[in-house]
Image (cartoon, rainbow, N blue to C red):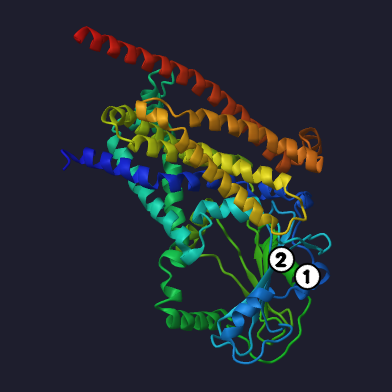
């Protein structure tokens, strides 16, 4: 089938990249946006535009907020058929309370879980989550979509396809294909170091596109390989091979019990009621112990297990923003007395490697330059895939035109939707966020529909305008959607100004970079899209003139022959 190994690798690289490149485009692009997901949340939710706050007092702020939480009535009704006996009016057998924040979050996420009396599966729990203002504990609306952390971030790793965890599997398959494409790409390009410095934008279109594809692939090759590999590792035990919760469920439960006994942390409730000591004093003690070990004392995660039971305990985890590795250095206290139960020891060498790889992928650290390098790495991956699409179509469309085939039209329309259409959909949800009324019922769903509707419209438009591709000419949808990107990228910050009053001069003057940074990025995207549209327009006119000349010459040749 193939004359040599390099030809086989070229085939693998081309078809793996084409078939799963559309998923990888989304993974790279939304991964780049997710680096600043919290900042995008601030732009999308004006009520949260204040400075990041530390973990607040449990006694003054968190406890009243936790006590207000109850599971959603819809979840209670869904649980009812799996419970023997009546459901309680109020759930008070608290399995856990937890609160989470980062150094970039002004708001605080709180979670609660309850054991259900009479549940046929004792492991089943009801749960609730909320968002509060950590300054006073007041509840914030939870029916609003957190576009950055609640939509763009899940798009990166699951495409927001939750049914049977299908999205995780699709992205995982694409990551595996990407690793194969990276290895095959290295085999194909023997002059790897030379291509690192080769870009000839003034050469023929096909040559310049291939140069850009090679350049963006080679420059960020370690980045691409590392993130595909670590992404697979992070989700391997949870979604891809969850044997601990499926085939080995009973053994997993037994291991948890033995581990809890060895660590001195109770595994379940004792059934004996007990009070709750001062949690703020426990947090202060944890911070003192971290300081004694030369560590920063910011609290990132606070967990209370088996609240109101004699087996209850409180775990305080460090934010760990002073290092790349995702560390917790948890310190655990007996809930009813405040007695120290356990201080997590230093990690083993294998665990330290896992913490470093996970932390490097999830980037919870304080390092703004490194964050921007992540953005550039993600966008370079998206550019590498986009130029791969362009090269595939440009190389084949004249051949398809000569044979009367429509294959190039289909691939080109999909490529337009995957590249410019994805950017348009992103801008569409941001514009919808600023246009839709704040009190609109199901506002988050409307924003999601705006995203998917815009993306679908871009695909329909690309297919509708793809007729020139069948004649070997560029699809005008590329240029037209670039102009649409420029328009929407300007409209979004303007609408933000109109609806909130937070124009660039104000946010820059106040030094509030979450909103100012998003607005500046949108304006930069508008400038890039506008310049690309102008350039595409010039190239389209030149291509049309060349095609007309070829047709005229062909007509003259036929006349002479006749």
Label 1 near label 2: C-beta < 8 Å?
yes
Q: Answer with mark 2 or mark 1, whichever residue precedes in sequence.
A: 1
Q: Which circle marks residue 501 in the picture?
A: none
Q: Is residue 171 above or below residue 7?
A: below
- The x and y percentages for residue 335 are 71, 80
Task: Read off the residue under disc 2.
Answer: 130
For residue 12, say whether it is visible.
Answer: yes
Q: Nearer the viewer, residue 365 or 338?
A: 365
Residue found 59% across the figure and 87% down from its top: 83
For residue 341, say whether it is visible.
Answer: no
The N terminus - image quarter: top left
The C terminus - image quarter: top left
Q: Is residue 496 left or right of residue 541?
A: right
Task: Read off the residue under disc 1.
Answer: 65
Q: Is residue 454 above or below residue 237?
A: above
Q: Is residue 265 left or right of residue 10?
A: right
Mark 2 Cα shell of 10 Å, populated few (<14), some (14-19), many (≥20): some
Q: Quadrant of residue 196?
A: top left
User: Residue lying farthest front?
Assistant: 562
Mark 1 Cα shell of 10 Å, populated few (<14), some (14-19), many (≥20): some
């Amino acid at each position: 089938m193939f004359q040599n190994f390099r030809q086989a690798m070229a085939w693998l690289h081309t078809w793996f990249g084409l078939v799963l490149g559309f998923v990888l485009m989304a993974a790279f692009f939304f991964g780049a946006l997710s680096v600043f997901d919290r900042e995008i949340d601030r732009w999308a939710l004006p009520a949260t535009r204040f400075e990041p706050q530390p973990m607040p007092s449990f006694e003054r702020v968190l406890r009243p907020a936790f006590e207000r939480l109850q599971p959603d009535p819809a979840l209670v009704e869904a649980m009812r058929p799996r419970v023997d006996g009546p459901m309680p009016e109020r759930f008070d057998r608290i399995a856990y309370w937890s609160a989470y924040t980062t150094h970039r979050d002004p708001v605080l996420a709180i979670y609660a879980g309850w054991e259900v009396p009479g549940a046929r599966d004792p492991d089943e729990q009801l749960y609730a989550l909320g968002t509060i203002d950590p300054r006073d504990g007041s509840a914030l609306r939870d029916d609003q979509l957190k576009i950055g952390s609640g939509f763009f971030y899940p798009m990166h790793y699951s495409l927001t396809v939750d049914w049977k965890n299908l999205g995780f599997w699709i992205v995982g398959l694409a990551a595996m294909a990407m690793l194969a494409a990276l290895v095959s790409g290295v085999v194909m390009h023997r002059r790897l170091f030379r291509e690192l410095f080769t870009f000839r934008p003034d050469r023929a279109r096909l040559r310049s596109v291939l140069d850009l594809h090679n350049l963006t692939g080679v420059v960020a090759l370690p980045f691409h390989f590392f993130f595909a590999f670590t992404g697979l590792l992070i989700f391997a035990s949870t979604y891809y091979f969850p044997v601990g919760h499926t085939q080995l469920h009973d053994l997993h439960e037994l291991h948890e019990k033995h581990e809890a006994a060895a660590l001195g942390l109770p595994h379940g409730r004792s059934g004996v009621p007990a009070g709750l000591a001062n949690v703020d004093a426990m947090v202060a003690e944890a911070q003192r112990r971290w300081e004694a070990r030369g560590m920063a004392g910011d609290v990132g995660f606070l967990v209370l297990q088996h609240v109101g039971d004699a087996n209850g305990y409180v775990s305080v985890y460090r934010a760990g923003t002073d290092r790349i590795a995702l560390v917790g250095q948890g310190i655990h206290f007996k809930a009813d007395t405040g007695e120290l139960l356990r201080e997590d020891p230093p990690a083993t060498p294998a665990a330290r490697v896992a913490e470093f790889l996970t932390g490097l992928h999830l980037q919870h650290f304080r390092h703004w330059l490194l964050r921007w390098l992540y953005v550039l790495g993600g966008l370079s991956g998206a550019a590498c895939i986009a130029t791969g699409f362009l090269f595939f179509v440009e190389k084949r469309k004249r051949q398809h035109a000569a044979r009367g085939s429509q294959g190039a039209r289909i691939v080109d329309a999909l490529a337009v939707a995957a590249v410019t259409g994805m950017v348009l959909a992103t801008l569409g949800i941001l514009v919808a966020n600023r246009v839709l009324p704040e009190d609109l019922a199901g506002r988050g769903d409307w924003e999601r529909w705006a995203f998917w509707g815009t993306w679908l419209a871009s695909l329909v438009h690309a297919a509708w305008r793809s007729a020139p591709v069948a004649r070997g000419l560029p699809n005008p949808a590329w240029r037209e959607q670039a102009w649409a990107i420029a328009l929407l990228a300007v409209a979004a910050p303007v609408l933000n100004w109109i609806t909130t009053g937070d124009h660039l001069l104000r946010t820059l003057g106040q030094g509030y970079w979450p909103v100012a940074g998003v607005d500046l990025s949108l304006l930069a995207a508008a400038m890039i899209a506008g310049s690309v549209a102008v350039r595409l327009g010039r190239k389209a006119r030149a291509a049309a003139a060349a095609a007309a000349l070829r047709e005229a010459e062909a007509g003259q040749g036929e006349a002479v022959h006749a």
